[in-house]
Image: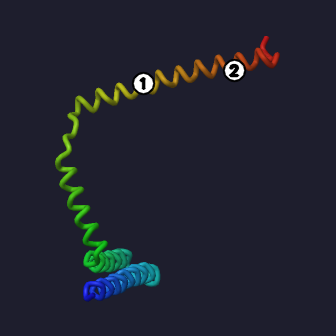
Amino acid sequence: MSTKTDTTTSDKLNFFKWFLVVLLLGGGIIGFYYFAEHSLLLRVFGLLFVIGIAALIASTTTKGRSTLIFLHDSHLEVRRVVWPTRQETVQMTGVVFVMVVLVALIIWMVDSILFWLVRLLTGQGG
């Protein structure tokens, strides 16, 4: 019974945190344009500061924690990738280029034959 109460309290707290994040981001964007007469550098730093605070608050929510875990796991996966060498990249790029040219020629030939047939069937060829 107390688990349901804890979950409801947690959901309300998460909702409040997300509401605060949206308010901070909205206020930061409005402030960025409201203080247009001030230095662009100061406005950008102020906006980045507000975004950082909003990100810290968002990271304390359930969805924020799961997003951080996902980003960490993604970073680990990217580190495991075996990237091709320069020679392999150049060779595969050449193969792709040749295939694109071949397919373009085949499509051009089929289009030319169909155009010739349509002209012949409609009586416009001659």
Which residue does the image show at 19% across and 40% down from the upper left? 82
Image location of residue 74, percent across then percent down: 24, 56
Q: In terms of image quadrants, where is residue 35?
A: bottom left
Image location of residue 72, percent across then percent down: 21, 61
Image location of residue 27, percent across then percent down: 41, 84
Q: In terms of image quadrants, where is residue 69?
A: bottom left
- Residue position marked by numbered label 2 in the rendering: 115
Q: Calculate the distance from the C-alpha at mark 2 to the C-alpha at mark 1.
A: 24 Å
In the picture, the disc for residue 99 is 1
Which residue does the image show at 17% across and 47% down from the upper left? 80
Instruction: Give the SS element for disc 1.
Output: helix
Q: Outermost residue, right direction? A: 123
Which of 27 and 68 lies nearest the eye of the viewer? 68
Residue 37 visible? The answer is no
Instruction: Give the SS element for disc 2.
Output: helix
Q: Amino acid at mark 2?
A: Phe
Is residue 99 toward the left or the right of residue 52 in the image? right
- Mark nearer the N terminus (2 vs 1): 1
**Protein image colouring:** rainbow
Vertical placement of 58 versus 81: above or below? below
Badge 1: how crowded within 10 Å, few (<14), some, or many (20+)? few
Q: Amino acid at mark 1?
A: Met
Is residue 6 toward the left or the right of residue 34 in the image? left
